[in-house]
Amino acid sequence: MKVGILDLLAPPARRPAEVGYRVLMTKQFASITPQAISVWCRRLGHETHYATYYGLGDPYRKLPTDLDVVFISCYTQVSHLAYALAKLYRRAGVRTVLGGPHAKAFPVDCLRFFDIVVGECDAELVADILAGQFDPGSTVSASRPLDDVPTVEERMPEIRRSAFFWGRKRLPLSAVPMLASTGCPYRCDFCIDWSSTYRPLPAERLAADMHYVARHAPGTLIVFHDPNFAVKFDQVFDILEAQPPGERPPYIIESSLTVLRGARMSRLKDTNCAMVAPGVESWTDYSNKAGVGREHGEAKVDRVAAHFAQLAEVVPYLQANFMFGLDTDEGAEPVELTKRFMDRAPFAWPTINIPVPFGGTPLHDQMAAGGRILTTMPFSFYYAPYLVTTIKNYDPVAYYEKLSELYTHAASADMLRRRLEASSHRAIGYVQRARTAGFRADIASFNRILGMLRTDPRFLAFHEGRTDVLPRFYHDTGDRMLGRYAELLTTADRTPDLSPAPSRTI
């Protein structure tokens, strides 16, 4: 069979300023499971074509048009592009399969456009799909989470296509995606991994992958896609330290502060850790991830900032992940506390996330039960700077004002200067400038939305949940996001079906 695998990483770029970021950064966000599917199909003897789309060019031209089956993976914000492509493939008689975070979160909506929607995936499930074991209209899932990831050596053709320039030349930030574990021990109610079981992958597989990268792609950045890296800390770091000191590739991890404590921090430096992105989330909640016990407010800020300062001595680049707009947030305090953290730890880039009710999470169920989801908001807007729920303790105007205040503080010239002074790495300096520019673009978006909230009563009524009539702004913005693919999706196509659905397992 002729099989295509397409990993959609971003919507089409709309501004020339986005091109550099998409090439150097977004291009490196390729997911592991689509690469694994490509390997599994190749093992079965199928003619296999793999591609990623990071917002440049025509996604439909990334693969041959005469496929028998196409597997597409996407996040929710690019799901409408996936839907439009599915319509084109179906017209050509291609069997369409959707997987990835969006398929797991909103399977019922996906089935309007795809023949098969996949939750958890493994080699056996892919073989059954290719063998025609499932009828159109099926939602299917492997009986357990992925735990047999093909090696980096097997995935190297896919890695070169996704991360290298023209599949050959390594870019400054070219990355090899890897996993040391799946699942997460924490139960954050907004996360699609909230109910997963933490499972370390075989130690010998991690050792083999590290050895291969060191020998065949020396100096190439490794990005670990673990939801929470090195929960089994000693087990993982014994493997990383087994590499000779001069052959340890730089790597990026997302972990929790409670894991990265004490003497463990020096092992990050010894093993060439380039970036850590701990989830702080909130100053009033999720303190088990921050390792601060029951402390909250200023006491939590100061302890977390001190912890980041220790990490900054051993790791070149830090990111702190926050949520603003949780039900525990109220008044000016969350904003002031986050600004205090920025001032205490200017070397840590603050990502400030808007709560998004992804299907299958407790947050979604809570929001749906309370009638707080804007049910006609298209999936294209399930990411910042857009708000798809009503916030418990802020009206829409107040919320966007405070969000703009946070971003303005983070993107100020003084903060940029302090970040640049804190790093002597040229690549990190570029990233700091690019991310600051991105925040400033987000501020402009917040202010544009604020202006409509203040002057357009219908726009305000929609965001207050008093009407489900989608404002014209979102229709027009959705068209611009999709470009020439907009004509393939009607208004009904873009109105989400938020119904949950059980998956069939094998």
Image: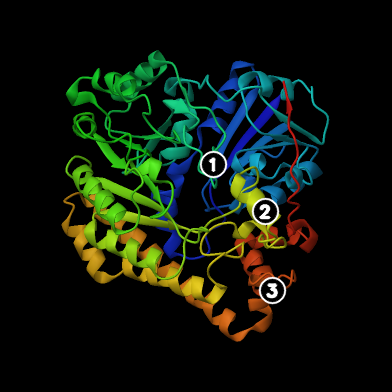
Tell me the quarter of the picture where residue 451 sits: bottom right
Q: Earlier in the sequence, mark 3 or mark 2?
A: 2
Closer to us: 470 or 42 = 470
Please state the horizontal and vertical placement of residue 59, each as a whole percent of the image.
Answer: 61, 48
* Three-letter code, disc 2: His
Q: What distance separates the C-alpha of mark 3 from that of mark 1?
A: 32 Å
Residue 427 left/right relative to 102: left
| Mark 3 residue element | loop
452 lies above or below 169: below
In this rendering, the count of numbered labels is: 3
Please state the horizontal and vertical placement of residue 407, each as a whole percent of the image.
Answer: 38, 67
Give the numbered dot on residue 13.
none
Q: Earlier in the sequence, mark 3 or mark 1?
A: 1
Q: What residue is drawn where x is 25% and y is 17%?
A: 242
- Residue depth check, mark 3 versus mark 1: number of the one nearer the observer: 3
Quarter placement of the N terminus: top right
Please state the horizontal and vertical placement of residue 365, each as a whole percent of the image.
Answer: 66, 49
Dot 3 surroundings within 10 Å: few (below 14), some, or many (20 or more)? some
395 lies above or below 307: below
Closer to us: 18 or 472 = 472
Q: Which residue is mark 1?
A: 52
Q: Which residue is mark 2?
A: 80
- Residue depth check, mark 2 versus mark 1: number of the one nearer the observer: 2
Q: What distance separates the C-alpha of mark 2 from that of mark 1?
A: 16 Å
* Three-letter code, disc 3: Pro
Q: What distance separates the C-alpha of mark 3 from that of mark 2?
A: 18 Å
